[in-house]
Structures are given as C-alpha cells and as structure tokens.
Image (cartoon, rainbow, N blue to C red):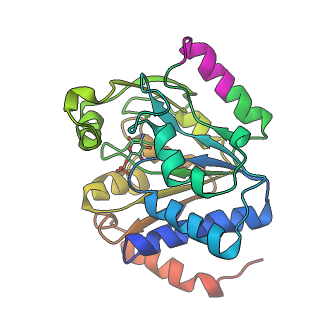
Amino acid sequence: MEVIIQPNYDQMSKIAAQIVVEVLNAKPNAVLGMATGSTPLGLYKELVRLHQKDQLDFSRVTTFNLDEYVGLPVNHPQSYHYFMHEHFFKHVNIPPQNINIPSGTTSNYPAFCEWYEQRIAQCGGIDLQILGIGSDGHIAFNEPTSSMSSRTRLKTLSKQTIDDNARFFERREDVPVYAITMGVGTILDARKLILIGSGKAKARAIAQAVEGPVTSMVTASAIQLHRDAVVIVDREAAAELTMRDYYEFIYAAKPSAPRS
Ligand code: GLP
C-alpha cells in the first residue's frame, strides 16, 4: 500500500485526479469505480477542470458507482444519482449509456444486485476504484461486520453512518436506513484502488484502515489485502498514523527509487 500525505484538501484532490489521469492515459476506455460523499468533490472538480481545460477525454470511459440509498428516486437531491450528475457527469463527456449506478428503487433487489455484478464483469472489471471512508471505517456502505468477500447487496446503515449523513437531509428521520452497495469483495476485485480521506473526523478511521488489523469491523482495512492500493490523505486525516514519517520519506524519495 502506498500512503501519500498532502498538506491540504486541494492537494489531496489534485494527486487523486492525477492518478485518474494516468489510468485514462494508459487506457482511454478504462472502467472507473466512482464514490460519493463530500470527500471526492474536489477530485471531481479537478477532473472537470482538466476536461474543460486540457480536453481530458471520457468518451470511452465506463463508470460504476459504489452505492445508492434505498428508496430515493434518481431525481431526489440526496440520491447518489443526483449527486453524480450534478457534480461530475453533467460536466464531462461520458456517454450516458456507460454510466452505471445501483438502483435505489428497483422492485427486485437481489436480482438487481446480481445484474450489477454481471455488468461489471461484462465490462471487463473495474480498472480504478475511487473510495472515501466513513467515520466508522466503512468503504461504500459496507458497515462493520460486512464480509470481506461480500458482493453487491442490500445493507442496513449503522447508527453512526445515519448520524454522519443526517447533515445532508432536512431531518434525521429522512436518512434512508437501507442502501444497496458493492461488497468488499467487489471492491477488492478492482485492479487499482485509491482511498481518499480528509479532516480530523477521519483520522481514526484512516489509522485503523492503514495500520490496524484487517477486520470486518473496519471494512476499509480490506485495502491492506489489495496489491495496488493508494491512500491519499490530508494532514488532519493523517494525524493518527504512527508511521507518518516513513510514508513521507517514501513519497519524497519516490522519484529516485529504482524502477526496474
Ligand atoms: C457515505 C458513502 C461512502 C463515503 C462516506 C464518507 O457513507 N457511502 O462511500 O465514503 O459517506 O462520506 P464523506 O466523504 O462525506 O465523509
């Protein structure tokens, strides 16, 4: 795992965007796994800027979002469909038919989840999965005790997650209790992972994910099992990492590290 510590949120977002650009340069028809939440907003803003300024091309890209709230229609302002269109899709040139987001309003969840997994496989698998992290250490909506081999399915949100996400809703009671989410196993199948974290509210979860035991109590710790995972954090989110100096040393020495 590579851990990159940046001075602030903007720098963190730029480094994450650079990794997306590298993947697209190497494979213009890459399959990208998308995340929602406030953390990736800066990354999406930077990708939109690069699209508008440098013609970063998404015309052959396919996307799969990690998760969606159950019960929210696509035009609900708090749905992840709405979020993705507002903050990213409507500003870039991904063909609409290449955009995949779990349905929060399907009539048959098990069948939909199975279809979503098949669709990822048909598209050749996810090349780069973008991840945020919940304050309870979750990735996507894989709450504590989610199996490390779980696939796309329905999950009940934890009290902590409902509390955290209540800030986006008028009332706490409005936060959906269920979500449809890619599983930890689905995420681990991606060829590359980037996990971004910002602010002191994430410091503990980041330390547990990077340096703690691999445990389904902190599903982000599953990234330790992945052979190409990059964690990009700002200083505040890095505050509880005990090996901080080592990560900074590695990153600073990276340009002169042997390549072959
Ligand atoms: C939700 C999403 C996660 C996201 C998390 C953190 O629970 N399902 O994918 O990582 O929120 O969100 P934020 O970036 O707003 O802290």
For the C terminus, the image quarter is: bottom right
Mark count: 0
Q: Tell me the magenta residue range.
A: 106-116
For the N terminus, the image quarter is: bottom right
Residue 131 vertical placement versus 116 (above, below): below
Q: Is residue 169 visible?
A: yes
Residue 59 placed where, x, y %? 76, 55
Q: Residue 112 colored magenta? A: yes
In which quarter of the view is residue 215 placed? top left
Q: Farthest residue in the top direction?
A: 108
Residue 209 placed where, x, y %? 41, 51
Q: Residue at x 33, y 26 (%)?
A: 176
Residue 200 vertical placement versus 53 (above, below): above
Residue 179 placed where, x, y %? 43, 27
Q: Residue at x 62, y 66 (%)?
A: 19
In which quarter of the view is residue 241 placed? bottom left
Q: Residue 36 colored magenta? A: no
Q: Residue at x 55, y 52 (%)?
A: 130
